[in-house]
Amino acid sequence: MPLSVPLCFTERLWLSLGLIVEAPIRYSVAEEGESGSVVADVAEDAGLAPAQLSARRARIASPAGRQHFRLERGSGRLVVAERLDREEMCGRSRTCTLAFELLLADPLQFFPIEVSVEDINDHSDPGSRFPVEGAQDFDVGSNDIQAYSIIPENKFFSVSYQKKNEGDIQVQLVLQQPLDREEQSELDFTLVATDGGSPPRSGTTQIHIIVMDVNDNAPIFTHDIYTGHIVESAPEGSLVLRVMATDADVGTNGDISYQFSQVVSQSQSAFTINTTNGEIRVKTPLDFETTHKYELGVRATDGGGLSALCKVLVEVMDVNDNAPEIVVSSFSSPIPENVEPGTVVALLAVRDQDSGVNGEITCALEEQLSFALRPAFKNYYELVTVSRLDREERAQHMVVVTAADAGSPPLTSTHTFSVDISDVNDNAPVFNQTSYTMYVHENNAPALLVGAVKATDADAGPNAKVSYSVVPARGPEEEPCSCVSVNSESGGVFVLRPLDYEQLRQLEVVVSAADAGSPPLSSSVSVRLLVVDENDNAPLVLHPSAATWLTGPLPGPCPTPIATRSASPRARATASSSS
């Protein structure tokens, strides 16, 4: 790479207009330098920090309009924008100076810059002379050598000869037009020397011209844009593609090396290029979901410093390496058991970071009769009820949603909704018997427990809390029996006052069981209370009278004695147990 050296620094002159006018900052650079070659750190030479270049919108302004150089704002360096050809720009002028300005817009400021383009010996110009050994003729005078010629004549060389002194002729081959080694690398012709004798005699020698190469050809890529494809699962070192450039020059001028010239996004860290053969390979793991396309700039540089650029596009192909995701937006639990079919329980979305068929998702429920998935919008689904729910039958439902992509093999993910069913008061209390029969011995103690009723409610919470009460048997207008009561919590039945078998042998009451729901539900049952006789009365003879029996004759056989009555064994056991 040609070196450039700042030639001088000059003092600055401040003008009252607020602009800074300075003597030029001068640099020199060799011609044929490659694009991107660094000329100098112009920010440092101008006394500016690189950050000021961006802040003040610095740029290169050229009066001629053509930009031979460009400014790197980030680094503050002045670099070659295109290949410089001194002969093309300045012809055969002894000096070749390119003048332009470094312009800072805010506040406005100019820095004049002059770059001298130095010549390198890259041309054999027309008119160049190449001395050759002259022929010898032992004759003298007019019989000596008189003329030289070329056979066959060609457009590149002519022969020039000039007599210096007696017998000494200077012979030169004169270049008539530029040579191009890439078009014709060698020339052969005959140089003829002719004397002045009669008849004239001549001598010949073969001239073999080898055209030496100069670096006048930049590398040329076989394509301006290369496109490669690589799967995201490709291991490190996998070949993406190979770029190729050719150079018409030979030797070191035709030796090409490759390197990345411009990196977009994370391309530099993701790939590496072989400087010798142009192979681009994977350097770090790829991820289609992070970056699916890379754009690389590749520079081919020959041994003489000339270069060319091409663009490389690398497309990363997706593989099915991401399972679907289930994202829950809303979820309601518990839900009442009396909700209507079609009630929305949850809203969820499914997504897959893969693309194509790898990102196509199907969503389903596992063996579910009470719930279903209903498409809502794009990739959203609603989890809805499809039938009546019954908490008493099933208080909790485990609903499993499965999302599967269409990759090969497919990847799946699941999400489980635990749906609790809340109770509503849809069940009345139920007694464990259709009717109850209880026994009590007469002459019982007050508030005697004679038995208990039991009712259960299939609901839950307050809806299942049962309370008992005695209600009128024939409607609300009738007062309930005052001699019997029931415990509201336990259902125990109590006889509140002593009973007399001889006056009341049985009674029947109605017991109601009501839950605490709103509104409450209730049921009732009949309780039959039998009074068991006790031997609490002495025998009483009503007929015949005692006097008649003692004095009169016997009318017949002796009457059968009145047997005393006692309670049956079952009645005694019941009353005893009740007390």
Image: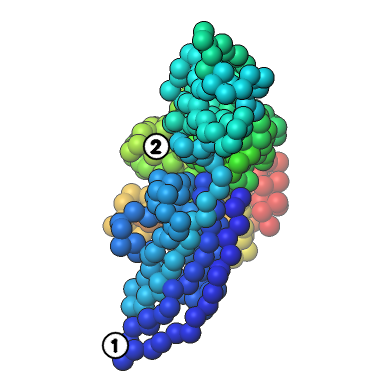
- Classify mark 2: residues with Cα within 10 Å, few (<14), some (14-19) or many (20+): few
Quick one: SS at disc 2?
A: loop
Q: CA distance from mark 2 to mark 1?
A: 65 Å
Name which residue lies at 62% across and 29% down: 167
Along the horizontal axis of the image, is 348 left or right of 181? left
Query: What's the residue type where badge 2 is placed?
Result: Asn
Compared with residue 81, is residue 214 higher up or lower down, i.e. above or below?
A: above
Q: Say if 143 sits above or below 517 in the image.
A: above
Q: Amino acid at mark 1?
A: Leu
Answer yes or no: do the residues labelled 2 and 1 have beta carbons within 8 Å?
no
Mark 2 and mark 1 lie on one chain; the one further toward the N terminus is 1
The residue identified by callout 1 is 17
Residue 466 at x, y = what percent? 50, 54
Q: Secondary structure at mark 1?
A: loop
Nearer the observer, 162 or 317: 162
Name the residue at 65% across, 22% down.
136
What is the number of the mark on residue 379? 2
